[in-house]
Image (spheres, helix red, strand yellow):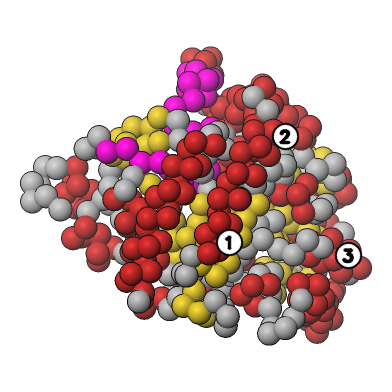
Amino acid sequence: MTSNPNSLAARDVASLIHPYTNLEKHKEAGPTIIAQGDGVYVHDDSGKRYLEGMAGLWSTSLGFSEKRLVEAAVRQMEKLPTYHIFNGRSTEPSIELAEALLKIAPKSLSKVLFANSGSEANDQAAKLVWFYNNALGRPEKKRIIGRHRGYHGITVFSGSLTGLAHNHVDWDLPMGPVLRTDCPSHYLYGEPGETEAQFTDRLVKNLEDLILREGPETIGAFIAEPVNGAGGVIVPPKDYFPRIQAVLRKYEILMIADEVICGFGRTGQMFGCDTFGIEPDIMTVAKALSSAYLPISATLISAPIAEAITAHAGKLGNFAHGFTYAGHPVSSAVALETLKIYEERDIIGHVAEVSAHFQAKLRSFLDHPLVGEARGVGLIGALQLVTDKASRTVLPAAAGIGALIQNAAMEKGLIVRASPDAVYFCPPLIITRAQVDELFAVVAEVLDIGLAEAQ
Ligand code: PLP
């Protein structure tokens, strides 16, 4: 890092604590300052261009220079830059966005609550489960089942629903009424000789055993991402969700679908729920809702939940919940324009087309000595890095190969995310076939660099 104390890099180190960053190392390494965006590319402050293979944080679906979103924000800023929806007030963009969401959402959903982030939307979902069961006179039915490797955010309760150790260790989490069940990766957690169908049977049985052991009367909901994102891009077996949902229904346990990454075309259909046969009672969305241009998220709820909480709020005299910026008119206007663009440009059709090529390219790396599994659906995927393909032994964290691959890709102008034992891809939905080729050409080079280091 430069020694000039007035450089942006030095000022960054002096003033900022960065999310998900090794803060000690950052003092030496300094930041990569992203200065500009252009379609699927971003440029750093030295002018170097990167293909953004993660769409930022799995979020910038329409790329980094969509003028219509800028114009929608400016129009709304000029008309009504801010207002709230407390106390029965409302704004046109928040009404129109709620309607537009319900038009494309799974049929089981009937009302929308807004928030600002994925974590808030999931916190809100949990609070609604509690309020709903209090409304029904079932004060015991409060625990929520999350899954190992699930990622639902980092607030006190969404962080508790998250099933990743690094989000818990020394953060005094999990906290509150949380139970945990299996991660549905057959590759990583299937027993030797166990078929995918047998694996699903085992997970369904484990869930039912957990429910019976803990008492169905104490369990209010189950939360899952259709495809786990941050926990490893885990694509579940085909009939996993319908079978899990049959168990949940048997015990009147609500299904919360966390669509914060999967929502709006990522999996090749509008929602991961559509791709995986989920009929959610509650669904949370964020990120691609506004192509991440402004913070906005939403929690969608079924008619029975909406009716019960409405009646209960009537009884209490108030629905005492809501964020200042829920339904913010500028964020809502940008989200509404985002949904219009998805429809007008047939983004789902584009994903269906380009993802066949993306997934084929991804799977072509199965020949690489370092790659044990290539998994994905639509425009999300991962390469599982192993030291031994036959025994499915994943790369040890201490080897540092994931970080090496991520850094080598960055040097070559590609942003991807790597865990110690996997590399993830989640490009903007507008990526072209040629850009998919460009992305994977760099991946081929950096996997070889990783292999050389691993040997
Ligand atoms: N849920 C999922 C599936 C996510 O991937 C994320 C963030 O990556 C969140 C929730 C949390 O969203 P936020 O970071 O906006 O709070």
Give the quarter of the image for residue 226: bottom right
Q: Residues within 10 Å of mark 1 (few under 14, many from 20)?
A: many
Contact (Cβ within 8 Å) of mark 2 with mark 3: no
Does residue 27 appear to the left or right of 63 in the view shown? left
Contact (Cβ within 8 Å) of mark 1 with mark 3: no
Q: Residue 300 in magenta?
A: no
Q: Which residue is mark 3?
A: 246
Q: Position of residue 187 (x, y in %)?
A: 64, 72
Is ligand 1 closer than 8 angstroms to the Cβ of mark 3? no
Does residue 451 appear to the left or right of 183 in the view shown? left
Q: Is residue 237 above or below residue 280?
A: below
- Please, which residue is most extreme toward the right here? 250
Does residue 300 appear to the left or right of 41 in the view shown? right
Marks 1, 3: nearer the viewer = 1
Q: Which residues are magenta?
A: 48-74
Does residue 391 appear to the left or right of 239 in the view shown? left
Q: Nearer the viewer, residue 310 or 192?
A: 192
Q: Residue at x 68, y 85 (%)?
A: 192
Contact (Cβ within 8 Å) of mark 1 with mark 2: no
User: CA–CA distance between discs 1 and 2?
Assistant: 33 Å
Q: Position of residue 154 (x, y in %)?
A: 51, 60
Identified by mark 3, the residue type is Ala
Q: Which residue is mark 2?
A: 101
Identified by mark 2, the residue type is Leu
| SS state under label 2 | helix
Is ligand 1 closer than 8 angstroms to the Cβ of mark 1? no
In which quadrant will I find the C terminus?
A: bottom left
Q: Residue 73 in magenta?
A: yes
Q: Nearer the viewer, residue 422 or 60?
A: 422
